Each structure stands twice: as structure tokens, then as C-alpha cells.
Amino acid sequence: MTILTTTGLTMQFGSQRALDTVSIEVPNGVTGLVGANGAGKTTLMSVALGLRAPTTGTVTVLGLDPGRDARELRARVGYGPERNVLPEDMPAFDFVKHLAEVRGMPRAEARGRASDVLWLVGLGEERFRPIGTMSTGQRQRVKLAQAIAADPSLVLLDEPTDGLDPVQRDEMLALIKQISRDYQIDVLLSSHLLEEVERVCDSIVALDAGRLVVQGPLETLVGDTQTVVVELVEIDDRPGSVDAVEARLSAAGLNVRRELSQLRVTGDDRRTTLDTIRDAVAAERARLRRIEVGRRSLEDLFIEVPA
Amino acid sequence: MTAAEIFDQGYRRFDGERAGIVSSVRSVVWYTTKSMLGIGRKGRHKVFPVIIAMIAFLPTVIIFGIVALFGDVSNGIRPDYYEFLGPSESFGFLIFAHFLYAVAVAPEAIVRDRRDGMVALYMSTPLTRWTYLIAKTVAVAGTMAIVVLGPALLLLLGYTIQGQGPDGFGDWFLVFAKLLLGGLIIVITYCGVSLGISSLTDRRAFASVAVLLVLLGGSIVAGTLVEELEMSSKYLVFDPLGSPFESAIRLFGDTSNGPAGAVSDLSVTVGVIGWILAGFGVLVGRYRKLSVI
């Protein structure tokens, strides 16, 4: 099922075009909204929340029109902003409870859920501490807690790992994955860190300067390729062995691209390619340093697609 | 005997009925009220609310006590009841409490949200800009009404107990209603001016200074035009500090003794409505254009 759809979405601020005829379909699960700063990620989120009316184009979120059904929609959507938006002298529990109430939870339910959600994000023991005394990692968890406290169907998280160290980032990503997997809450995760999106997301929407770069399930966009990377070592008693292996592979009908002592070998069938490489290396008694299946990362995708 | 079991459901999906927008607004009103009054916050946030409460209620309670103990304190002359709202020599301290509230406490209601970025979070909820502003206005006006109407009603009660109140239930109720209406005029005017000016900055100190300059400065300029430059007394409608009090006095069919007494009822009414519209107009205009995310 599609949770967010845009058709020809354009957002113009004066002479600046923040979104340029963007047409996307965001499916269930965790979707990464990736792009450099200024790519239009936050603008897309504000349009999805009904806080900005698009210049042209249409948007549908959870089957609702954000402009017309803003109140109904926002009761079902949680939002974790990028900015540090936490009142310093307020205990985390009060903050989460208050926002759960504002998002439509009955008072008694909001109290219980605030406690439960703070335990879920690992702040159970800290829940009565003023937010101003918390670390950056804890504050990001509080932001996540308030976003999911009112049991949303969809959560929009804007750079939720901003300012976190690697360990805290791993924990935050695991939490995001958990809320999607265990509670079936769909997540639209905005980030400019491609590596973290690749780790946690099921699909991606990539924007660049307001334009759609690519979208789709992550497994079809990144992952193993038909290319095998072979790195050989040229040794004194076998001079020219790299040239010889390259020649054998080419003769076998494989596409070989050489970079010094590294060969990037591409064939129709990966298993056959690996067998051919093994035979060629053995026949030339070449010394093998490394052999691995080539992998296309999100970063590669970003480099390839605009080109 | 049945075995006891600890049953912790933890975080779970919610399948009950969600509360409506009124509940959202109520939550913001309560959160804002607590924030303004410094409830659950550090001691420094409680300083102005405590000072204002002392200015407004301590003398009032003392006067109430004197009236209750000694009975007739004014040789049988009944007070002008509008004086309970502040415009008099005896109860002038009340005006200072109202003024201090508008300058030092009310701006906190909206400035803090913009400074902390809470506006962005509120706007991602079922609240709209307008329901958000309604919640903020209710919070500010509600707490200010305690400062304005609390002492007035306490004094009316004290004088009534000692037989110096209005004669009969009908008159008493009429005075009560006029005090209520007069108090609300003062509350809404100060609330509008304070919120309107506060909406222009993210710094509470700047907001407080700006509100002070407009209220006090406007009053001084209007007074100077009329009293020093001998211009028409109609210019006193530009006095944001005095106009709502003059309006409250007119509700009781009286006028103040100074030059403001020469201004027509219509001009006073237009002046007060003008200040209210100007204040809330700035507030609404500012939030209409405010970029929240």
C-alpha cells in the first residue's frame, strides 16, 4: 500500500524552486528520504503535513489530502523535527505526555503512553529528568518518543541521527527499525547520510536540488552486481601474470576493466564468472590478494543516476 | 488462591477513541498557563508571577480584612465600584499589577514556543495556527483575569459583607456584571497589545521592553499631546494604558476626573476596540506568515 503519493509536486519560494515536478510513491515500511542539505527533503515533509500548499501538483498522505484534511491527517502522523525543539526545563515525561494529548490522546491514556514510550526508547529511568540536562542522544530519543506517543500510522523523522556519535546512531537506527517492524508504524526518514539510510530503510526516495533522482525498493537499487572485483599481486617469479589473467578472461568472453593490478570482471552469470576467474588465476599461477562480488551502494547510485 | 501476575503491556497500538480539538486546545492552555506562572520550572521563572500576585492580592486582602474588622471605613460614603478594577487613589496599585503582568508574564506565552521551536511541533499536530493562537489567548487572558477580576470581586465581597455593597440582589448583580465586563475589557486590551507585540520577536526581554514602551510610551505621548500641547482630549484614546480603564468607568455611567472625562463614550469605545484590533491584528498577521518548518 502507498502511504504518500505526489504527482508533479512543485514548490516555489520566490525565485527559488524547492521542489520541481516531483512524482513519488512511498510504500509501507521505512522509507529513506535522501539528499544533500537543500535538496527539498524538509519542504516535502512540510507539504506532507499540510503546512505548506504546493505551488502546483497534488499530494496524498494516508489517503488524505493534507491541505483539505489537515487536522484528521495530523492526528495520524507523528513528526520528529530536525531542530532542537525541546523545552529545556520540562521533564521528558511531561513533554511527551503534553504532545500526546495535543495529538488527540485522552488525558489518562496520554499519561500511560508517555511512560511506555519513554521506556521503549530507553529513557524509562530518565523520564522525569528535565530535558535540558539530557545528552544529545537522549534528546533525539525524546523527539522520537513524542513522535510515536500518540500511536501514529506514519512518522516523519527529519535527520533523527543528527549530532549522534556512531554508537548512539546505531541505537537510534535500531529503534526506528523496531517501531516499524514491531508496531507496523510506517516511517519516512529524512537523512543526508546515505550509509544509515541503506542500513535501515526498505525503500528510498532520493532528491537533488528539488528534483527526484531515483525512487524504489532498496533491494532493487543497491546490492550485489554481476561484476567481480579481482585484485592480483605481481611477483618477481611470475612477471606478467596480471596481463595473462586479463587476457584469459577476455578470451573467455568476459568484460574486463583493469585498474593497475585490479580487474573488474563482468559476465552474464556471476557463478560462471567466478569459475572462469578461478581457472584463469590457477592456470597462470597468479597470486590472488582479494576477490569479491561488486556491490552498488546508495552513494554509487547517486553518482551514476544524475550522470 | 490465585497467582498474582505482573502484566506490563508496554508500548502498544491505541484502538480507543481519540479526543477532539477541544482537548488539544485545553492541553496547550494548561501547559502555557503553567509555563507563564513558572509552575514546575526554576525559581527565576516564578519571580514575576509571585510579585504580581503580591501586588494584586496582598493589599486587597488587607483592605478586605480592615473592612471586615472595622466595618464602615468611609463614613457611610459608598465607594465607586469601578474603583475595584484599579482606577482610583485607593486601589491604584492594581493597575501596576495589570501592567506588570502584560509586560513581564504574558509575552512568555508565545515567545518561548518560537524560541524553543515548539511552534513547529504544535503545527504538526491537529492544531492549526488559529486554534493554537486561541489556546494562547485563552491562557493569557485566563490568568490575567485572575489578576484583574480576583481583587475586584474580593473587594466587592468585603464591602457587601459590611453592608456597603450595592442595595438589593438586582443592583448587586448589575455591579458584579459591570465589574466582570469592565475587567474583561482591561484583560482583552492588555492581552491583545502584549501578544501582538510579543509575536514580533523571539526574545522575551525584547518583547517585555517593547510592550512596556508601547503601553507606557503610548500613555505618555497621549498625555503630553493633550495636557502639555493642549490638543483635543480625543487624543487620549491613543493611550493604551488608560483607555480600557476609562471604558470600564463608563460602564458604571461615570467618567474619570481628568481630561479623559471630556472624551465621548463613542471615542473611548472606538479607542479600546482599536487597541484590541491592532494587537490581535498584528498577532494574526505575524502567525499567518510564520514559517514553522
Image (tube, helix red, strand yellow):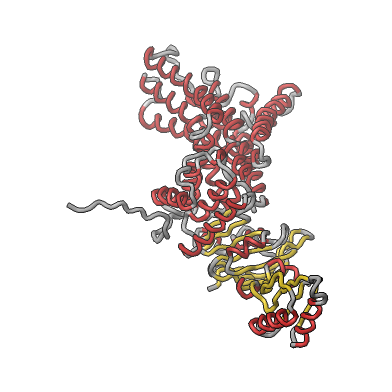
Q: Quadrant of residue A292?
A: bottom right
For the point 40% across and 17% down, the residue is B65
Direction left: furthest residue = B1
Please provide percent x and percent y for residue A265: 73, 79
For residue B275, above or below residue A212: above
For the point 60% across and 48% down, the residue is B119
Q: Nearer the viewer, residue A164 or A56?
A: A164
Residue A39 visible (yes or no)? yes
Please provide percent x and percent y for residue B172: 40, 29
Q: Nearer the viewer, residue B86 or B266?
A: B86
Direction front: furthest residue = A237
Please provide percent x and percent y for residue B261: 61, 26
Q: Nearer the viewer, residue B25 or B40?
A: B40
Q: Quadrant of residue A36?
A: bottom right
The count of marks equals: 0
Q: Is residue A265 left or right of residue B148?
A: right
For the point 43% across and 20% down, the residue is B61
Indicate the quadrant containing the C terminus of chain A: top left, top right, bottom left or bottom right.
bottom right
Please provide percent x and percent y for residue B94: 53, 24
Residue A8 visible (yes or no)? no
Q: Is residue A159 left or right of residue A14?
A: left
